[in-house]
Image (cartoon, helix red, strand yellow):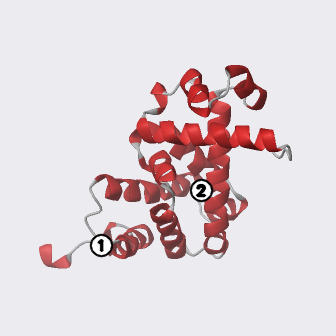
Amino acid sequence: MEHTSKDLRVRRTLKAIRYAFYKLVLEKDYSDISITELTERAEINRKTFYLHYSSLEDLVQEVEQEIADSILENIHFSAENLDVAGCVSTFYHYLDECSEVQQKLLCDSHYHFFYEDVTNVVLQSDAFSTFFSLTEHPDIVRSFSISITYIYRDWVKNGRPIPLDDLISYASKLILSGYSGVVDKNKM
């Protein structure tokens, strides 16, 4: 649902809903967030919420689309130029610099549906569709591309054990050259 009202009261209400949702995301798993609690936090009644959203999922979809659009805006140039390493670098920097709420929505396992929806929007964009269409098996390449975000998410989950730039370099090598690009020949 697109919200473009110029009415100050509507904008304040939408801002209050969004702020309350973000606070709840930071405190709870998605399955524990209710419309009742959201509306109490936003200091509005349920009817007011339903004037703007048909469900909590409707609000989530709006946030997903906004984040996907922001990612695409940042990564578009690299994707259009088939620059895999540039895509990895831009995406990892985006994830590392986004807000705490966005980090949780994109990296916390309790919000896996959110990450998957955003990933699908990004990978179905024109730039990535072109990227995949240049391969013999686009669906397989698309599936492999999803590993880029899993690498980042595991890095966060494991306490960021190496610097971000090292992660970018290693993930880029892995994606561009596969296992043979990262295996330590001295250990063989």
Q: Identify the image quadrant of residue 52.
A: top right
Residue farthest toward the left in the current orientation of the protein: 187
Q: Work out whether residue 184 can be spotted.
A: yes
Residue 137: where, in percent of width, then height?
57, 56
Vertical comparison of 163 with 120: above or below:
below
Residue 62 or 184: which is nearer the viewer? 62
Vertical comparison of 12 with 143: above or below:
above
The three-letter code of the residue at mark 1 reads: Val
Q: Nearer the viewer, mark 2 or mark 1?
A: 1
Mark number displayed over residue 182: 1
Q: CA distance from mark 2 to mark 1?
A: 24 Å
Mark number displayed over residue 138: 2
State which quarter of the image contains the C terminus. bottom left
State which quarter of the image contains the N terminus. top right
The three-letter code of the residue at mark 2 reads: Pro
Vertical comparison of 148 with 16: above or below:
below
Q: Is residue 57 left or right of residue 163?
A: right
Residue 92 or 41: which is nearer the viewer? 41
Residue visible at 66% across and 74% down?
A: 77
Residue visible at 67% across and 51% down?
A: 66
Residue 28: where, in percent of width, then height?
42, 34
Q: Secondary structure at mark 2?
A: helix
